[in-house]
């Protein structure tokens, strides 16, 4: 029975019938019996746990793939947005560039116009100076303290500048000898020119005085003094400035001693003084001139104000564009450094990568006074330099470093002017230093006075070209504005000097010009030559008011030459005699037409009973009356003789 039970038990169990010898046992052989593990409860649990681990791992992998894909999508969207923004900024910069180009062209046009205006004002000033320089003494009456031989007082104002005794005035050896010219009216004397005797005794005039005033008391020798003559060499003429002293009498006196007084020529220059002796008509004439000058001054002031506004607007626009176009100039530069540590090239500080790790930075050996330099390839006004320090080590190495900017490569540029001394830049940070538009081609970072490793992770340079086209135009524009204003002031001053002169016979005034009407007839060329000989030119008509005025200078039916031709291009390029193109015309109906193919290159004015008259193109060899015009500032008269 026990054997059957044992046999039954053996059937239930799986027996591993591997046999091995068991040493040191009594039986000698030992059979090993193993049961199958998966048939136990904990085996099933282990299997389930393994399956769960596999499922968990698969879930984790799936999540990783999902989030990685989402991350790449977000990054792609950000890059697309950045690209779109950069495209918009590029378009805005292009628009700004185009606008600045237009403004530059406008400024160039203004510059050219102002240059023409300056040249014209200079010519007017020169002509006016030449016109108003009249020797007032030539029409005066001379007297002197006594007569030696036949040397009359008049000999000093006869216009002859010979310095020989025979052409000079001469007194006896008088005590306080004097000579005097009566100008016959009160003038503001600007200068007196005195010519000394050349053949003898020039020292006799030493200590003589020139006095100017309205008194004849003591023969005028007590009038206000212009100058004391120290010495005039033999035969020379000296001019003395009298600063517009007012007076009718100009006196030369040798005070305090007995002397012969000899004058070979005395010239007086000045302008009529405005006194209470002027008539009402003269007062009205002066008032008219004053009003015209006031209008011209106001027009100039308006032009000046407009130019100032344009200049300010241009400056603001330039500043705005400079702020918009903030470009790192170093990106296009060429870098160098004092030495190379491993493979950390100087270029790595201007590659645009702002990583602060050692691998993205430049690095020198431990040099004495180590340096790093970027060549911007052109001269710039550097406004700011931004420097990024290393983040993974040793930020203190940059303490005491200097940024220097200039155009010199002497000692590798480390002696160029200094922008800043860097006290400290924390690890991994970027600091910006203002350099106040220092000019230079080279930007250098140097650690002076010690041996050190020099490491720069990124260096950025911001600024503008040292001399831009806009700057040059603006400077020229400002200089021309100053010259124009100075010339205008000079013209006003000269105009003030010539007030009160009557117009020459045959001239009439309108606005700021004077007009001469001929009484004979000549060809167009001969008419213009006549005007030129009078210091004028054929009339140029600039407005309807002037056209109407010209129409009234002759009776209806008269035909007169004006200063308009098309010599250069038949029928298509009408120009005035000063070279300006025709803008506003008053042609007769159907004109100009070069009738029957004739060379009708000149223009005649048809005077009509109704305003404002008409123009006709005509052959230049025809004979007509003509009208000359001269600007107010070109003549010696200011009255309106209508």
Image: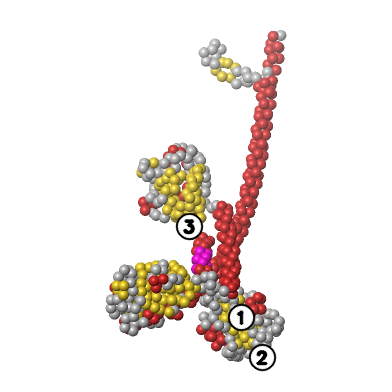
The residue at the far top in this view is 1
Q: Residue 12 versus residue 476: which sits nearer the camera?
A: 476
Single out the mark in the foreground, 3 or 2: 2
Q: Residue drawn 50% across and 51% down?
A: 383
**Residue span colored magenta:** 481-491
Q: Quadrant of the N terminus?
A: top right
Does 360 sit above or below residue 523? above
- Mark 3 secondary-structure assignment: loop
Q: Residue drawn 39% across and 49% down?
A: 414
Query: Picture coordinates of residue 179 (x, y %)?
Result: 37, 75
Q: Residue 234 versus residue 432: which sits nearer the camera?
A: 234
Q: Magenta residues: mostly which secondary structure?
A: helix
Q: Which residue is mark 1?
A: 574
Does 392 sit above or below residue 636? above
Q: Are marks 1 and 2 in contact (CB under 8 Å)?
A: no
Q: Is residue 555 magenta?
A: no
Q: Which residue is mark 3?
A: 466
Q: Residue drawn 48% across and 77% down?
A: 131
Single out the mark in the foreground, 1 or 3: 1
Among numbered discs 1 and 3, the one appearing first in the sequence: 3
Q: Residues within 10 Å of mark 2 (few under 14, many from 20)?
A: few
Q: Residue drawn 53% across and 74% down?
A: 500
- Mark 1 secondary-structure assignment: loop
Q: Which residue is mark 2?
A: 596
Query: Picture coordinates of residue 231 (x, y %)?
Result: 32, 70
Among numbered discs 3 and 2, the one appearing first in the sequence: 3
Alpha carbon separation for disc pair 1 and 3: 45 Å
Q: Residues within 10 Å of mark 3 (few under 14, many from 20)?
A: some
Alpha carbon separation for disc pair 1 and 2: 19 Å
């Amino acid at each position: 029975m026990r054997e059957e039970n044992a046999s039954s038990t053996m059937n239930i169990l799986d027996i591993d019938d591997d046999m091995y010898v068991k040493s040191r046992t009594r039986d000698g052989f030992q059979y090993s019996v193993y049961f199958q593990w998966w048939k136990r409860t904990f085996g099933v649990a282990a299997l389930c746990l393994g399956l769960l681990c596999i499922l968990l791992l698969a879930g984790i992998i799936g999540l990783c793939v999902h989030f990685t894909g989402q991350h790449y999508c977000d990054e792609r969207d950000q890059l697309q947005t950045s690209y779109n923004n950069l495209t918009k900024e590029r378009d805005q910069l292009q628009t700004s560039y185009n606008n600045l180009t237009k403004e530059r062209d406008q400024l160039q046009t203004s510059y050219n116009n102002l240059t023409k205006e300056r040249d014209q004002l200079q010519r007017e000033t020169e002509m006016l100076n030449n016109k108003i320089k009249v020797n007032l003494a030539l029409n005066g009456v001379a007297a002197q303290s006594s007569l030696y031989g036949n040397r009359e007082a008049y000999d000093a104002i006869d216009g002859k500048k010979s310095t020989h005794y025979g052409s000079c005035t001469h007194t006896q050896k008088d005590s306080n000898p004097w000579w005097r010219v009566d100008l016959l009216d009160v003038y503001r004397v600007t200068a007196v020119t005195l010519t000394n005797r050349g053949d003898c005794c020039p020292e006799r005039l030493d200590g003589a005085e020139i006095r100017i005033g309205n008194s004849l008391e003591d023969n005028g020798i007590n009038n206000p003094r212009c100058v004391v003559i120290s010495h005039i060499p033999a035969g020379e003429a000296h001019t003395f400035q009298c600063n517009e002293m007012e007076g009718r009498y100009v006196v030369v006196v040798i005070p305090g001693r007995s002397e012969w007084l000899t004058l070979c020529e005395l010239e007086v220059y000045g302008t009529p003084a405005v006194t209470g002796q002027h008539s009402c008509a003269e007062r009205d004439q002066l008032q008219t001139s004053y009003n015209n000058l006031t209008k011209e001054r106001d027009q100039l002031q308006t032009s000046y104000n407009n130019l100032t506004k344009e200049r300010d607007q241009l400056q603001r626009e330039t500043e705005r564009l400079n702020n918009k176009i903030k470009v790192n100039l170093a990106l296009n530069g060429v870098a160098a450094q004092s030495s190379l540590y491993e493979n950390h090239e100087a270029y790595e500080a201007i590659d645009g990568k702002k990583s602060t790790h050692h691998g993205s930075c430049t690095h020198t050996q431990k040099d004495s006074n180590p340096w790093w330099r970027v060549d911007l390839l052109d001269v710039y006004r550097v406004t700011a330099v931004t420097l990024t320090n290393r983040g993974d080590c040793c930020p203190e190495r940059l303490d005491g470093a200097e940024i220097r900017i200039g155009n010199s490569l002497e000692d590798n540029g480390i002696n160029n002017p200094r922008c800043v001394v860097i006290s400290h830049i924390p690890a991994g940070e970027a600091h910006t230093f203002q350099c106040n538009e220092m000019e230079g081609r080279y930007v250098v970072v140097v650690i002076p006075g010690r041996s050190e490793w020099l490491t720069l992770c990124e260096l950025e340079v911001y600024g503008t070209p040292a001399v831009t086209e806009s700057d040059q135009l603006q400077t020229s524009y400002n200089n021309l504005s100053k010259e124009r204003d100075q010339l205008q002031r000079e013209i006003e001053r000269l105009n003030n000097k010539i007030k009160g002169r009557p117009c020459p016979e045959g001239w009439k005034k309108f606005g700021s010009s004077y007009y001469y009407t001929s009484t004979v007839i000549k060809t167009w060329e001969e008419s213009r030559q006549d005007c030129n000989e009078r210091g004028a030119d054929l009339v140029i008509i600039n407005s309807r008011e002037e056209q109407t005025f010209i129409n009234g200078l002759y009776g209806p039916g008269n035909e007169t030459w004006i200063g308009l031709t098309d010599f250069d291009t038949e029928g298509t390029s009408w120009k005035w005699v000063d070279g300006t193109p025709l803008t506003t015309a008053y042609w007769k109906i159907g004109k100009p037409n070069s009738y029957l193919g004739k060379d009708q290159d000149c223009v005649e004015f048809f005077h009509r009973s109704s305003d404002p008259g008409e123009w006709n193109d005509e052959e230049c060899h025809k004979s007509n009356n003509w009208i000359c015009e001269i600007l107010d500032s070109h003549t010696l008269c200011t009255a309106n003789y209508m």
